[in-house]
Amino acid sequence: QEYTALKLKVIEWAPKAAETLKGKIPEGASVYLVPATLRPETMYGQVCCFVGPALAYGIFKVAENEYFVMTERGARNMAHQGIFEKEGVIEKAADVQGSELIGTLVNAPLSFHPEVRVLPMDTVLATKGTGVVTSVPSDSPDDFAMVTELAKKADFYGIKKEWAELEIIPIIQTPTSDLLAPHLVKKLKISSPKDTKQLLEAKELAYKEGFYQGVLKVGDFKGEKVEVAKPKVREQLIKAGQAFAYSEPENKVVSRSG
Ligand code: ZZB
């Protein structure tokens, strides 16, 4: 699976994360959350960044003064893709729990909302990507269901309501809507992130319609079909140093050494 890993630079740590990380990362170092996405052309619509509150994350050294926040599993995959300074070597500077990251302020490349918060999502899988997910509620039904839930029950989730209420701006036009995910969530009567079956169906519909029939409404490739614009947006992000290619095996491959 070929992903685009986006670099969301930490602007300000949540207090708990700051405490945990004290003295473990050099002063002045750049630290990035690195969500893996299959939809680089939707990055204009990022409104927050999800982590699994119960998941374990690490802060991994990438180069002098550069660190990535992700799961150990993500780091293990990256270690063999020419991303880290020393090929095959993982240097972990610190451990941090997902829950401690909630509220951290990060920069979201290309987004209409340049500064977004790290928010909790229980369904983030430790077994996929980097365990960090950038949220685009205009085009991802899972993301729309989750931000709606977070805004409704902000106290329960221990967040500020306004963190989950950034405006959802239309970025892709399809024959049915320019806010495809909210449209599908309503149409399939999805009322919470727990409606997993309908959400899976909505995601499949959104992928298909977005890719084959979508046209970008914003950005440098405005007016171009998603199919055409997707690799261009990806290239632009990579050239700007705001993203990089990240891949992982679809199925577990058993190594020869066991
Ligand atoms: C931004 C985005 C915008 C995404 C969109 C999707 C959509 P898959 O394998 O089919 O689910 N993702 C990445 N890592 C994880 C994880 N560890 N746990 C849960 N979700 C994860 O597709 C991968 C997508 O699932 C990624 O692309 C990411 O969300 C999320 F408008 O990034 B995406 C219709 C989907 N639209």
Image: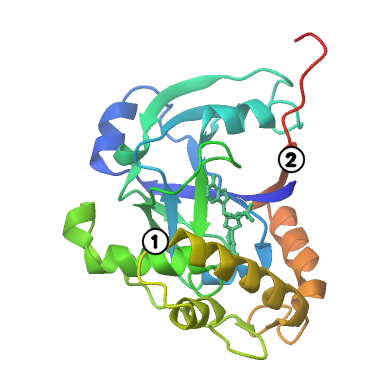
Q: Earlier in the sequence, mark 1 or mark 2?
A: 1
- The location of residue 23, given as percent across then percent down, is 34, 22
Whether residue 216 sits left or right of residue 191 in the image: it is right
Within 10 Å of disc 1 (Cα), the crowding (few <14, some 14-19, many 20+) is many
Amino acid type, label 2: Glu
Residue 193's label in the rendered image is 1
The residue at 46%/76% (across/down) is 185
Amino acid type, label 1: Pro
> Among all residues in the image, which is located at the extreme left?
155
Within 10 Å of disc 2 (Cα), the crowding (few <14, some 14-19, many 20+) is few
Query: Height in image: 75 above or below 137?
Result: above
Q: How is the image coloured?
A: rainbow
Query: How many dots with numbers?
Result: 2
The residue at 50%/65% (across/down) is 199
Quadrant of the picture in which ligand 1 is shown: bottom right
Whether residue 105 sits left or right of residue 202 in the image: it is left
The residue at 77%/59% (across/down) is 235
Q: Which is nearer the eye, 108 or 29?
A: 108
Q: Secondary structure at mark 2?
A: loop
Q: Quadrant of the C terminus?
A: top right
Q: CA distance from mark 1 to mark 2?
A: 25 Å
Q: Which is nearer the eye, 136 or 94?
A: 136
Whether residue 103 sits left or right of residue 32 in the image: it is left
Query: Height in image: 125 above or below 79?
Result: below
Name the quadrant containing residue 100.
top left
- The answer to whether residue 46 is seen in the rendering is no
Task: For ligand 1, tell me if the residue under mark 2 lies within 8 Å.
Answer: no
Q: Secondary structure at mark 1?
A: loop
Residue 250's label in the rendered image is 2
- The location of residue 119, given as percent across then percent down, is 35, 53
Query: Height in image: 202 above or below 50?
Result: below
Query: Height in image: 64 above or below 30?
Result: above
